Amino acid sequence: MFGIAQVFCIVHALKTGRRDWIYIILFLPVAGAVAYFIKEMLPEINRGVFWENLQRLFFPNARLRDLERRVRISDTITNKMNLAEELMLLKRYDEAMAQATACLQLRPNDAGIILPLARMQFHSGRFAESAENFQKVLGIKNRMNNPDDELLLARALEGMQETEKAEEEYKRIIRLHHSLEGRYRYGLLLKQLNRPQEAAAQFQAAKDEIELHPRYVRKLHAQWARLSARELRTVR
């Protein structure tokens, strides 16, 4: 029975891109699988997204077919945007943007449409369009509720080679949200700009600050501290 659990953890790690865990699970079968479950699966279970994510991993088209059926039955903006966001999760960005753009034509100033579209454009590499739409949301609402969207704006600006604007955005995110991912990504930008000492300071801060957060936050953001520690070895 435990062998089945071990195989399941390995397949899950492989499909979710957590390849570093595979060797740990293989060479420490019991302890590795238990550690993987606690650190990687349990937070998703606690957030109530594990089974939905699991369905996407092993039956990627099941939810998509259901959402497509709903659109055929009732061609509403809500149904089309749900379909668009599922297509984005499946990395079918052109189809996702087509659905969202059709909705935007009906409601051109709806932040609930513009924001997901900006995310889709970012992930498809359309950084200028993505940044424009994120900034349009800021013009409508004067803020974004999710720090992850603020990070995507900073990364879109970086993708456009607007490094000064990206840097200011990273600094603002770090100041307001104490974001470990923000520190990590800002460190990567500084490293790219050949500012190794400043980059090292950001990586070191991300590595140190993880211990200051509550336990559940540490579990959610441990990867950024881990990646920062890895980068820190390359800039010293």
Image (cartoon, rainbow, N blue to C red):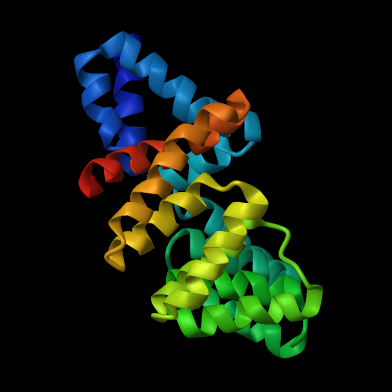
Residue 138, can we see it? yes
Q: How many numbered dots are placed on residues in this image?
A: 0
Q: Position of residue 153 (x, y in %)?
A: 55, 70
Looking at the image, which is closer to me, 138 or 100? 138
Q: Is residue 104 above or below residue 118?
A: below
The quadrant in which the C terminus is found is: top left
Res. 76 image quadrant: bottom right
Q: Is residue 121 left or right of residue 23?
A: right
Q: Is residue 78 left or right of residue 179?
A: right
Q: Position of residue 133 (x, y in %)?
A: 62, 81
Residue visible at 54% across and 35% down in the picture: 220
Residue 45, can we see it? no
Q: Is residue 138 left or right of residue 24?
A: right
Q: Is residue 181 above or below residue 171?
A: above
Residue visible at 25% across and 29% down in the picture: 22
Q: Is residue 60 above or below residue 27?
A: below
Res. 147 image quadrant: bottom right
Q: Position of residue 158 (x, y in %)?
A: 43, 73
The quadrant in which the N terminus is found is: top left
Toward the front, the furthest residue is: 197
Residue visible at 51% across and 45% down in the picture: 180
Q: Position of residue 204 (x, y in %)?
A: 40, 40
Looking at the image, which is closer to me, 106 or 22? 22
